[in-house]
Image (cartoon, rainbow, N blue to C red):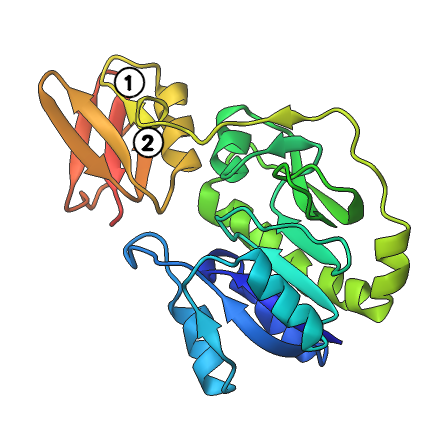
Amino acid sequence: MKIVYLGYDLLYPALEALYQEQCGVQTIFTFPTDNRYEFNREVIGFAEKHRIPWTAERITLTDIHTLINQGCDAIVSAGYIYRIPVDHTLPMVNIHPSLLPRGRGPWPMPVTILRNEAFSGVTIHKVESSFDTGDILLQEKFSVSPRENLETLMQKVYTRLPAMIRTLVSDFSHFYAHATPQGEGTYWPDPDDEGATVTPDMPGENIDRVLRAFYGYPCYLKREQDLREIVKGKFVTQLPEKEPAVSFRVDAGYIIVEQ
């Protein structure tokens, strides 16, 4: 099966899984990243290691017509931020880290934690002109722990990708032809800075939830006119015996900065 891959490092295990299942990757489309919190190094490194053409330019309808003429069997998207021009003569699927139709949107993982969702999942669905609305080919559901953070949530996504890709590739035409319409869904907007900000007077459980939701990405502690960026923070009611290098006092306890 010849595919074209669209994405960056967030869902890089999907690209590795496709390669392990003997998919021929013709081209890789990625996009510029800050290489601080979002990366494309692994995807580009994979392309260069296997001598696969890659580009950070946005995919166009002309590109898609060229891919069709080159014998491409399908496009697989995983975290690609740009809207993909749809031509239904070429099958296109997207890997989305939520239990669609619940959790449409660009970054559902933090919202899953902020909303105290009991379950999440991974969905492989058809690409349509509206983001995250296409018929569902495959879906895996998993529970979300009360202590889940963004990092552990993504590990649950990663552990399910190889088996899902294996199943998809084993009979792609069947799954594509028998995909199930989503029906009505819910869209979760990208969290803004306000949603990623804690203040000293907030209840401890609220501070804890925000820190877990954005663990590994920036969130903020606002104290009067002072705004501190926190990337890997943890809320505790008491400081450990060995005090961390960086911590902040809040009304309900402490924020420990692990990085």
Where 98 sits versus 175, above or below? above
Residue 126 marker: none
- Lower position in the chain sequence, tag 1 or tag 2: 2
- The residue pinned by badge 2 equals 235
Quick check: marks 1 and 2 in contact, CB under 8 Å? Answer: yes
The residue drawn where x is 59% and y is 69% is 15
Residue type at mark 1: give it.
Ala
Where 239 sits versus 90, above or below? above
Q: Please provide percent x and percent y for residue 145.
A: 58, 36
- The residue pinned by badge 1 equals 252
The residue drawn where x is 83% and y is 64% is 172
Between 172 and 255, the residue placed more toward the observer is 172
Q: Residues within 10 Å of mark 1 (few under 14, many from 20)?
A: some
Between 255 and 19, the residue placed more toward the observer is 19
Between 32 and 227, the residue placed more toward the observer is 32
Residue type at mark 2: give it.
Phe
Q: Secondary structure at mark 1?
A: loop
Q: Is residue 239 visible?
A: no
Answer left or right for 218 relative to 125. left
The residue drawn where x is 59% and y is 26% is 187
Q: Please provide percent x and percent y for residue 56.
A: 41, 64
Q: Please provide percent x and percent y for residue 22.
A: 71, 81
Residues under labels 1 and 2: Cα distance?
9 Å
Q: Residues within 10 Å of mark 2 (few under 14, many from 20)?
A: many
Q: Secondary structure at mark 2?
A: strand
Q: Is residue 168 visible?
A: yes
In the picture, which quadrant includes the N terminus? bottom right
Answer left or right for 156 relative to 32. right
